[in-house]
Amino acid sequence: MTKLIAMIDGSVYAESVCDHAAWAARRTGASVELIHVLDKRKAGGDGLNLSGNIGLGARSTLLAQLTELDERRAKLEMQHGRQVLDDAVARVTADGVADVTTRLRHGDLIDAVHEFESDADLIVIGKRGEAADFAKLHLGSNLERAVRGATKPVLVTARAFRPIESFLIAFDGGPSAMKAVRHIAEGDLFKGLACSLVTVGAPTADASRRLEEAERLLTDAGFTVDAGFESGEPEAAIQARIERDGVDLLVMGAYGHSRVRTLIIGSTTTEMMRSCRVPVLLFR
């Protein structure tokens, strides 16, 4: 891993994003690029258009005043964005990372992820954004779209960082799960951490073969692996295992089924991100 990008906003998750990005950078020697997107939908305030309500006699004067107001708002948004990034840089460097750059842009978060992920090895993003409804535990409105569209692994942070000493791979034998196993085996991010490899479901011959193959890749890479099966529904079984063993981070494949199937029966990925209190590393 040589570079990671961290999406920074003004939410309470921003500090956690910084801390998780710094953790990954320290373990891999990667540089960190902090990106803050000024949402084009919010630019210039609430977007209220008053020009049609202005009488003829006052139109030119008030339009000039409204234009000046929009310009002031835009400048304030830019200043706030730079301050957000300056604070993020200070936090990441205080966490021990020297190679930190920033990028401030107008636009859409999803477009920014697509634009800047090409030369990055990891994307770090908070579970919820500035507009999230914490009372209802809603995910950030852009999070699912960002994960579905990303071609690189996405680390979805918990609300606060805590030391990561163990991780659990939710392994279903599919392509994205094997991609996660290979990435872990070949990289430095998880070296030296306690590893659990869990398949939820009946231990059929095929499922056992796939689990053994994944375990072998990890043990050959130097990991000590606690591999096995759990019974029950995937979301509940994995969550219970995380809580029982005090796991610090969950690794899983993301959105292995179509949007149509997700609309009908729901998504394991979305449910795990919503309910899980530890960071989640997702592979497409």
Image (cartoon, rainbow, N blue to C red):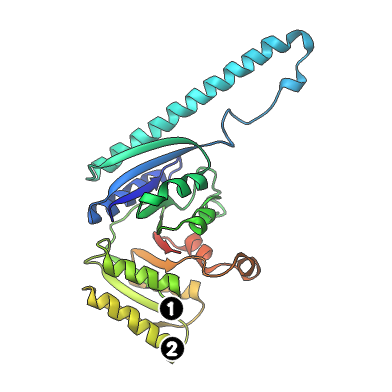
For the residue pair 262 and 162, the one nearer the viewer reads as 262
Q: Most extreme residue toward the front, as rendered? A: 118
For the residue pair 185 and 48, the one nearer the viewer reads as 185
Residue 176 x/y as whole percent: 44, 70
23 relative to 210 in the view: left or right: left
- Marks 2 and 1, Cα distance to the nearest angstrom? 9 Å
Question: Which residue occupies 64% across, 13% down?
Answer: 64
From this view, report whether residue 281 is shown above or below residue 233.
above
Q: Which residue is mark 2?
A: 206
**Of helix, strand and loop, which one carries label 1?**
loop
102 relative to 113 in the view: left or right: left
**Could you tell me if residue 79 is visible in this image?**
yes
The residue under label 2 is which amino acid type? Asp
Label 1 Cα crowd, 10 Å radius (few <14 / some 14-19 / many 20+): some
Q: Which residue is mark 1?
A: 173
Of the image marks 2 and 1, the number of the one nearer the N terminus: 1
